[in-house]
């Protein structure tokens, strides 16, 4: 024992439980594809852009669509039990898992979330909000919470503003990529609506360093950065298409 600062995760009591719950329940649920707005990997992003271009082609869209990105501030620590547990319950029920079994899973997840202890200078602290990064189930847990939030929030937004975001708004974890034929200014309404829908999940959109406007509304950007991709609009003689390049 030394007197030096000591910060360590010591979730050993629940980390095995977290592993089992993720392996047996959460991960298979994410992988089953029930989360229709989830981009799981690069291939999903490519398919998404391909579907978007098919849509532009089939509908003879001539005008430049608005392509936007948005992401959540401090995503993992923001995902609370009240957001995640109803989401997980719903997705497990969709897979035909019985209610008593779901109750056991939810109880287990509560134990994992309440077991986020860490030690600082010989004192133990318990992280009570959101998720700790160290638990094996954290990514699946947060992905399911996000999917359920979007399932409720996007249709509500569309009904409130009579504007379609679907089917072209998807997220990779907490990074959203969207496309709309509506006026670009719609992005401000989307942001406000999302941020008021669930106050624990707060979204931001990239701002231009030069004019401090949202990038999507300013003249300084001809492309959008999403994860490690660059997304651009290419004008061709009859219409145009969305191009995606990987690697910056
Ligand atoms: Zn600008």
Image (cartoon, rainbow, N blue to C red):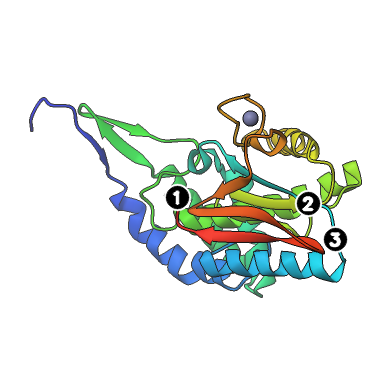
Q: Nearer the observer, disc 2 or disc 1?
A: 2
* Residue labelled 3 has its Cβ within 8 Å of some atom of ligand 1: no
| Element on which disc 2 rests | loop
Whether the residue carrying mark 1 lies under 8 Å from ligand 1 is answered with no
Label 2 to label 1: alpha-carbon separation? 49 Å
* Residue 132 vertical position relative to residue 246 in the rendered view, above or below: above
Among the two numbered marks 3 and 1 on one chain, the one whose residue lies closer to the N terminus: 3
Tell me the number on the disc at residue 111.
1
Residue sitting at 56 percent across and 42 percent down? Answer: 80
Q: Secondary structure at mark 3?
A: loop
Q: Outermost residue, right direction?
A: 162
What residue sits 83% from the left and 53% below the top?
63
Residue depicted at 62% across the width and 51% down the height: 146
- The residue identified by callout 2 is 64
Q: How far apart in space, not on screen, are marks 2 and 3 (Cα)?
A: 8 Å
Determine the image quadrant of residue 118.
top left
The residue sitting at 10% across, 25% down in the picture is 3
For residue 37, side relative to residue 239 (left or right): left
């Amino acid at each position: 024992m030394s007197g030096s600062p000591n910060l360590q995760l010591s979730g050993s009591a629940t980390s095995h439980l977290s592993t089992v719950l993720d392996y047996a329940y959460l991960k298979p649920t994410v992988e089953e594809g029930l989360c229709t707005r989830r981009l799981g990997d690069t291939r999903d992003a490519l398919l998404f852009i391909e579907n978007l271009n098919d849509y532009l082609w089939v509908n003879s869209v001539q005008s430049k669509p608005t392509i936007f990105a948005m992401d959540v501030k401090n995503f993992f620590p923001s995902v609370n039990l009240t957001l995640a547990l109803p989401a997980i319950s719903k997705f497990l029920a969709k897979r035909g898992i019985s209610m008593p079994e779901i109750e056991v899973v939810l109880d287990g997840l509560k134990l994992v979330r309440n077991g986020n202890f860490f030690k600082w200078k010989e004192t133990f602290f318990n992280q009570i909000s959101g998720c700790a990064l160290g638990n094996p189930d954290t990514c699946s847990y947060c992905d399911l919470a996000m999917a359920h939030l979007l399932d409720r929030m996007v249709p509500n937004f569309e009904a409130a503003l009579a504007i379609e975001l679907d089917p072209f708004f998807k997220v990779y974890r907490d990074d959203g990529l969207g496309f709309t034929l509506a006026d670009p200014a719609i992005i401000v309404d989307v942001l406000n609506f999302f941020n008021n829908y669930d106050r624990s999940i707060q979204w931001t959109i990239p701002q231009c360093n030069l004019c401090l406007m949202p990038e999507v509304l300013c003249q300084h950007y001809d492309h959008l950065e999403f994860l490690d991709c660059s997304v651009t609009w290419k004008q061709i003689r009859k219409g145009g298409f969305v191009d995606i390049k990987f690697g910056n």
